[in-house]
Image (cartoon, rainbow, N blue to C red):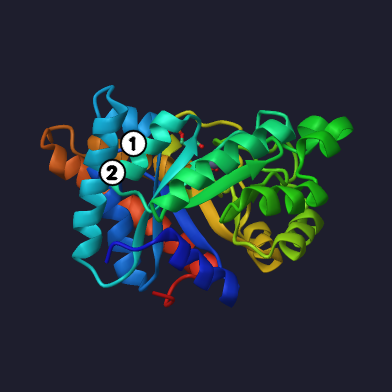
């Protein structure tokens, strides 16, 4: 059924596993994720960025929020595993209100680019509004950047655990995304993948909240190679290896944000289908194969993070 993100993440926090939060912009990715959750008997969090709301709503964020929420609710209510819908990287009250009105069960306020006091003030204001509507809130502390891109200044971009403690006490936020060395997209690390495990452990100990890892895609080599075999150029692509994610989950990460891996799998399926079937022009056929690849990637993540069987 359609579920609350807070229920999904409280269970994951109490039992010590990770749940994928998968980004969508359209109907196809929603179908692929719900199908994977059913096959794995796993909970799933579906998330939509402000850009996704704009895309789905043809430029109208409020309309897009309703359209995505209506679709997710329909697909979720047709299955027995819990599926929730989250607003990813909300930046302003207007977009957050649109998501709340549309029925999203959690929202992210991302004021991590602001100084601490301002981040606290903005986040607390969102928490008041959201909690009044029964909606949970995620916030972010620190800046998402690769550790090695900023060797000299890692301390200034990664989360400060003492600040995290103060932040959650003063804002009453439900989930916290601490910057620990990952970054968004398909090109995360130049050398070896590096994240600060100790910092995750400290933040968990001091906050006792479900923690969120952004920029958590694995960018699996087999999918990159398949997409490249059919003409894509993703040279230099590198993500967070499974073993690194599993250690991060052991240290306290519960929500594992994944967008890039789904995009690459969809791209590989689409390119493969079009290359092998030059006469095909029915979108249900070429989206069909692309969707199946997304389902496969999502299932792999559910197994790897430990959410399979936890519905
Ligand atoms: O964190 C960003 C997510 O991958 C969503 O990306 O803003 O391009 O929709 P987007
Ligand atoms: P990836 O780019 O690693 O998939 O991260 C997605 C994300 O953090 C969405 O908020
Ligand atoms: Na988010
Ligand atoms: Zn993110």
Q: Residue 40's quadrant in the figure? A: bottom left
- Viewer can see residue 237: no
In the image, taking residue 270 as reference, residue 11 lies left or right, namely right
Seen at 46% across and 41% down, the residue is 88
Q: Which residue is mark 1?
A: 98
- Residue at x-position 15% and y-position 37%: 283
Residue closer to the observer: 183 or 74: 74
> Around disc 2, counting alpha carbons within 10 Å, would you say few (fewer than 14), some (14 to 19), or many (20 or more)?
some
Residue under circle 2? 102
Above or below for 263 versus 234: below
| Label 1: how many Cα within 10 Å (few below 14, some 14–19, many 20+) | some
Residue at mark 1 to residue at mark 2: CA–CA distance: 6 Å
In x, y percent, where is residue 180?
72, 47
Q: Secondary structure at mark 2?
A: helix
The N terminus lies in quadrant:
bottom left
Q: Is residue 272 visible?
A: yes
Residue 265: where, in percent of width, then height?
39, 45
Is the residue at mark 2 in contact range of ligand 3, meaning its CB lies under 8 Å from it? no
Q: Residue 10, position in %: x, y?
A: 52, 68
* Mark 1 sits near ligand 1, with its Cβ under 8 Å away: no
Residue at x 63%, y 54% (from the top left corner): 241
Q: Seen in the image, is 42 located left or right of residue 303?
A: left
Q: Residue furthest right?
A: 152
For the residue pair 214 and 53, the one nearer the viewer reads as 53
From the image, which quarter does the C terminus lie in? Answer: bottom left
Q: Along the line of sight, which residue is nearer the eye, 27 or 224?
A: 27
């Amino acid at each position: 059924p359609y579920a609350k993100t807070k229920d999904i993440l409280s269970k994951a926090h109490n039992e010590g596993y990770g749940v994928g939060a998968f980004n969508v912009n359209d109907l196809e990715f929603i179908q692929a994720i719900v199908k994977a959750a059913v096959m794995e008997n796993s909970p799933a969090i579906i998330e939509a960025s402000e850009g996704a709301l704009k895309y789905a709503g043809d430029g109208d964020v409020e309309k897009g929020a309703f359209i995505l929420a209506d679709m997710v609710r329909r697909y979720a209510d047709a299955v027995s595993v819990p599926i929730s819908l989250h607003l990813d990287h909300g930046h302003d009250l207007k977009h957050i209100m649109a998501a709340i009105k549309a029925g999203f069960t959690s929202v992210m306020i991302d004021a991590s680019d602001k100084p601490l006091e301002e981040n606290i003030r903005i986040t607390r204001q969102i928490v008041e509004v959201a909690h009044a509507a029964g909606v949970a809130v995620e916030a972010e502390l620190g800046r998402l950047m690769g550790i090695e891109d900023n060797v000299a200044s890692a301390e200034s971009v990664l989360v400060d655990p003492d600040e995290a403690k103060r932040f959650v006490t003063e804002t009453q936020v439900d989930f916290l995304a601490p910057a620990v060395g990952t970054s968004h997209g398909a090109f995360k690390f130049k050398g070896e993948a590096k994240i600060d495990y100790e910092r995750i452990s400290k933040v968990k100990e001091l906050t006792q909240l479900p923690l969120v890892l952004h920029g958590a895609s694995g960018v699996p080599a087999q999918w990159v190679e398949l997409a490249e075999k059919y003409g894509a150029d993703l040279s230099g692509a590198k993500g967070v290896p499974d073993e690194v994610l599993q250690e991060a989950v052991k240290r306290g990460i519960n929500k594992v944000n994944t967008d890039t891996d789904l995009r690459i799998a969809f791209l590989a399926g689409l390119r493969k289908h079009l290359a092998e079937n030059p006469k095909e022009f029915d979108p249900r056929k070429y989206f069909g194969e692309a969707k199946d690849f997304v389902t496969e990637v999502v299932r792999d993540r559910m197994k790897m993070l430990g959410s399979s069987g936890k519905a």
